[in-house]
Image (tube, rainbow, N blue to C red):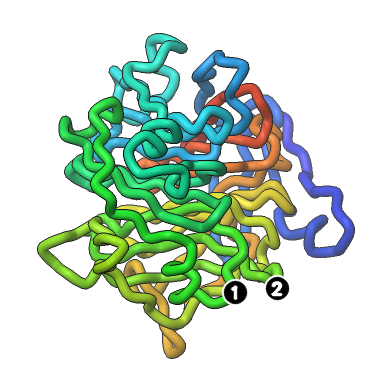
Amino acid sequence: MKLGLLGFFGNNVRSRTDNLGIYRPESNRHIQIYNGKSRFYQFWGQKQVISSSTLKTITGLTFKTDGTEVYILSDGDNTIYQYNLPIPWDITSIPSITPTSSAELDSYLRTRTGNSYSLTVPTGVSISSDGSLMTIVDNYDRKIVQFTLSTPWDVSSRTFTNTTIDANRTLWLIPNCDLVSDICFSSTGNRLFTLVENTSNVMSVYQFNINNSSLLFDIGTKGSPNYTYSSPSLDVSGLDTSMRGIAFNNDGTKFYLSGLQNGRIYDLSTRIPFSWSVDYPVNYDEGDYLYDGFISGREGSPQAVAINTEANSMDLYVVGTSTQNIIYQYKLIQR
């Protein structure tokens, strides 16, 4: 067995030493120790999806709650693609590059509501736990668009229900918002999270409450929004100034952020599930990453991240900014 000492290049000491550890080159496994903690992870497999040359970047990634379907958002053709997984949570089991189902969203919106509701740069997708609501965030004008899926979990059955909160409404709740990278809900649907960059180039996670407990995962209508901003926001710029993806585990004790600046997936823990406050802030375990793109470099800079919520994050899924259209899966083992 070969052992090696692993460090990283960078412009400062932290970038070169954060993930110093021992690894086995032949197995691509890295043993990371930080503040007495150990993380083990291993590359599991990869799958190419969508061969269309019109696809620019996969910007959104999410799964059905039982892991039998994966959903991929493209900002090149403003389309959501759906693939069946015969082996739940195993992306290598996807049988064909041809999607099981798909739905083009941009022209669909325009024909029903006019150009003001077109999707220009869709950056994130989330689907409710019962598969009935699909939520898309659009970075170009910072709006959230929500669709009803008349056949649960089938994206081709999408129906626009006019439950859209446009940029002005969002900006009224989030001052100085300049960019929205991703969106996700708590597993129970009573909390909403957006990954935001403000006009001062500060990356933050904003948290919202869903007001009506009988309308979980539902953001409401433009005239009657079903959410309220919950202070404070979480400044994550100290980790990475170019965050692109966010995913929570099932019980809300951990969440994961994908960052382009350092090419890493960041692992953060919370004292209050699906929340943080001034009194109980997020526990910053900087360097305690579940995955670091510098170790394998398979996906390049991570654009979107998803996790196996049934196993409470023991599988990590990443897509990068390249045009290879590949999902990478990493099997995680904690000690």
Q: Between residues 162 and 276, which one lies in front from this camera angle?
A: 162
Q: Is residue 140 left or right of residue 147?
A: right
Q: Mark 1 points at which residue?
A: 176
Viewer can see residue 333: no
- On screen, residue 155 above or below 315: above
Decide which of 321, 2 is in the foreground and name it. Answer: 321
Q: Do the residues labelled 1 and 2 touch (CB within 8 Å)?
A: yes
Label placed on residue 200: 2
CA separation in Å, label 1 and label 2: 8 Å
In the rendered image of this protein, does residue 160 appear above or below residue 213? above
Would you identify the image quadrant in which residue 238 lies?
bottom right
Q: What residue type is labelled 2?
A: Ser
At which x and y percent is residue 271?
A: 39, 75
Position of residue 164 relative to residue 303, above or below, is: below
- Farthest-out residue, bottom: 279
* Quarter assignment of residue 272: bottom left
Residue at horizontal 57%, vertical 51%?
140
How many numbered markers are drawn?
2
Q: How many residues crowd around disc 2 within 10 Å: few (fewer than 14), some, or many (20 or more)?
A: few
> Dividing the image into 4 quarters, which one contains the N terminus?
top right
State the mark number for residue 229: none
